[in-house]
Amino acid sequence: MGLHAYLTLSALVFAIGLFGVLTRRNAIGILLGIELMLNAVNINLVAFSRFTGDLGGLVFSLFTISITVAEVALGLAIVIVIFRVRKTVEADRLDLLRG
Amino acid sequence: MIVETVGFAVVAVVLLASSLAVVLTKNLFHAVLYLAAALVSTAGIFLLLASPFLFAVQLLLYAGGVVTIVVFAIMLTERLVGERIAQTSRDIVNGAIVAAAVLVAVIGFLVQAPAMTPPATAVAEQTVAIGKALVGPFAVPLELLGLLLVAALLGAVYFARAED
């Protein structure tokens, strides 16, 4: 399999994740879309690492995965707090900062 | 070679189908389960790319950790709501247009790029090499990552703690 196959697959997953982020109403659903996009980035990193024989891509995607876990934990904690205060996690109704 | 091609096709189909299910299914809990399927098939991609170490990391951290956390968050918010989280989407046409535009832009770059052939062998002793890199040239980023994780988890506990 060529590098293009992996990069195309990753671009497709990224686009699907972007679609989810743009269209989901629930804040948790938006987070799931972000997960898909980050996942697509990891595919790219590992594919380039394999095709250039460079270890850096593997280490970098290791870091990306760890940071994503931290991001998810923090994001969901914020979602729970928002839910406690506003009694909703619908992104459309969280418009406190809208001018 | 033929095994790799067939394996890639199977994993790619599973990955794309479960990714679509994540953004399209109505039930949020089902969406998380499809996300788990997508993450596991991504781990399969890593295996195809001769990266068994990242395969394990992906399964443990992503498919194990992230999915568990999200399931907990859904259970917490759902229980408090007292109603099923049937989630809806909005602006589907606009979202599809933007996503398709990004996809076309990326693919446009890809078709211009020259094809690359992988080196005959992957990085030898990959796990050993990664371990040495993490305590060698990447030692400072690794420490910063540990700091970030501690800060993020402390922050998460602080935010989500029981109200008293």
Image (cartoon, rainbow, N blue to C red):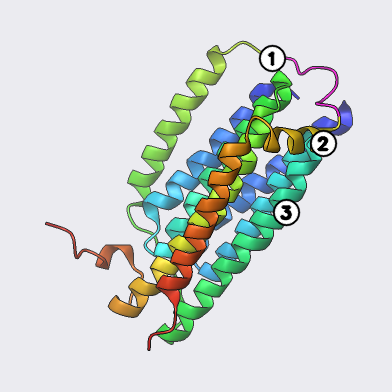
Residue B160 painted magenta: no
Query: Do the residues marked 2 and 1 share a common chain?
Result: yes
Give the answer, above or below, for where B161 lies relative to A94: below
Extent of the magenta region: B116-124
**Residue A12 locus on image (x, y percent):** 55, 37
Q: Nearer the viewer, residue B101 or A68?
A: A68
Q: Inspect the image, locate mark 3, and give the three-letter code of the amino acid beneath it.
A: Leu
Query: Residue extending furthest left?
Result: A99
Q: Which mark is residue B59?
A: 3
**Which quarter of the rendered picture does the N terminus of chain A lie within?**
top right
What is the quadrant of residue B117 in the picture?
top right
- Chain letter of mark 2 equals B
Would residue B137 be seen by someone viewing this image from the given angle?
A: yes
Residue shown at 73% from the left, 39% from the top: B45
Mark 2 or 3: in front is 2
Q: Nearer the viewer, residue B133 or A68?
A: B133
Tag of residue B128: 2
Name the chain letter of the residue that bears numbered label 1.
Answer: B
**Helix, strand or loop at disc 1?**
loop
| Residue located 48% across and 66% down the image | B154
In the rendered structure, which disc, 2 or 3, sits on the residue that comes first in sequence? 3
* Residue B23 relative to residue B129: left or right: left
